[in-house]
C-alpha cells in the first residue's frame, strides 16, 4: 500500500497514533489516495483528534471532492459532528463553500436535522 493510501486509511478509521507516525515520517498531509481524496476528506468525522492532527500539519480544509464539490466541512455538517465543524472552522474552513448542487454546509446540516450545527453555523 502506498503511503498516501495508508495515511488516508488511518484517518478514515480514526487511528490517531498511526496518522501521527505517518505524518512524522513525512507523508504529505494533502496528498490524495488512489481514490483521489485527501486524508481530511476521508477522515472519521467524529474524530476531532484526527482532524486536529491533520490540520496542525497543514491539511487544507477547503479542498473539495472532485465528484460532489463537498468539502470536509460539508461532510462534518451533514453528519452533525459539531466538534469537528468547530475544529475545521478554527483552521479557516470556508462556511460559504458550495457543493455542485449549490448547497452550503449549513444547508446540509439543516437537511439532516442537525440543529446544533445549524445554529452554530448561522451564528458566524
Image (spheres, grey):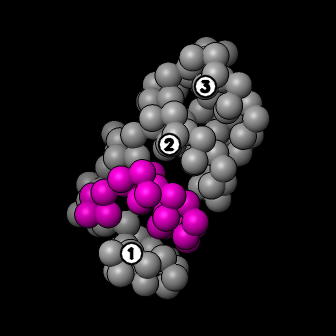
- Residue at (40, 46) in percent of width and height: 61
Which residue corresponds to mark 2?
55
Q: Which residues are magenta?
A: 71-97
Residue 35 seen anywhere in this rendered image of the structure: no
Residue 30 at x, y = what percent?
A: 45, 30
- Which structural element holds mark 3? helix
Where is residue 19 shown, x and y percent of the image? 67, 32
Residue at x 34% of width, y 80% of height: 122
Q: Secondary structure at mark 2?
A: helix
- First in residue order: circle 2 vs circle 1: 2
The Cα–Cα distance between marks 1 and 3, rounded to whole angstroms, is 30 Å
Which residue lies under the disc numbered 3?
23
Few, some or many residues within 10 Å of mark 2 (<14, 14–19, 20+): many
In this view, 112 is above or below 39: below
Bin the neighbour count of mark 1 within 10 Å (Cα to Cα): few under 14, some 14-19, many 20 and up.
many
The quadrant of the image that shows the N terminus is top right
Residue 90 among magenta residues: yes
> Is there a contact, CB below 8 Å, between mark 2 and mark 1?
no
Chief secondary structure of the magenta portion: helix
Q: How far across and how far down the image is residue 32, in percent? A: 46, 27
Q: Give the number of the mark in front: 2 or 1.
A: 2
Q: Characterize the local packing of mark 3: few (<14), some (14-19) or many (20 or more) Cα atoms within 10 angstroms.
A: some
CA gap between label 2 and label 3 equals 11 Å
Above or below, 95 relative to 10:
below
Write the residue at 52% across / 82% down: 116
Left/right of residue 112 with respect to residue 46 in the rendered view: left
What kind of element bears circle 1? Answer: helix
Q: Quadrant of the C terminus?
A: bottom left
Question: Which residue is tagged 1?
Answer: 121
Separation (CA) of disc 2 from disc 1:
20 Å
Amino acid at each position: 500500500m502506498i503511503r498516501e493510501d495508508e495515511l488516508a486509511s488511518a484517518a478514515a478509521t480514526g487511528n490517531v497514533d498511526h496518522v501521527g507516525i505517518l505524518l512524522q515520517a513525512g507523508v504529505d498531509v494533502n496528498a490524495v489516495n488512489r481514490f483521489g481524496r485527501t486524508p481530511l476528506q476521508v477522515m472519521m468525522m467524529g474524530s476531532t483528534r484526527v482532524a486536529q492532527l491533520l490540520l496542525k500539519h497543514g491539511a487544507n480544509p477547503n479542498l473539495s471532492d472532485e465528484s460532489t464539490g463537498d468539502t470536509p466541512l460539508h461532510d462534518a455538517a451533514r453528519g452533525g459532528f459539531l466538534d469537528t465543524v468547530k475544529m475545521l472552522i478554527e483552521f479557516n474552513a470556508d462556511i460559504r463553500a458550495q457543493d455542485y448542487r449549490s448547497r452550503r454546509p449549513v444547508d446540509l446540516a439543516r437537511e439532516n436535522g442537525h440543529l446544533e450545527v445549524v445554529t452554530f453555523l448561522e451564528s458566524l
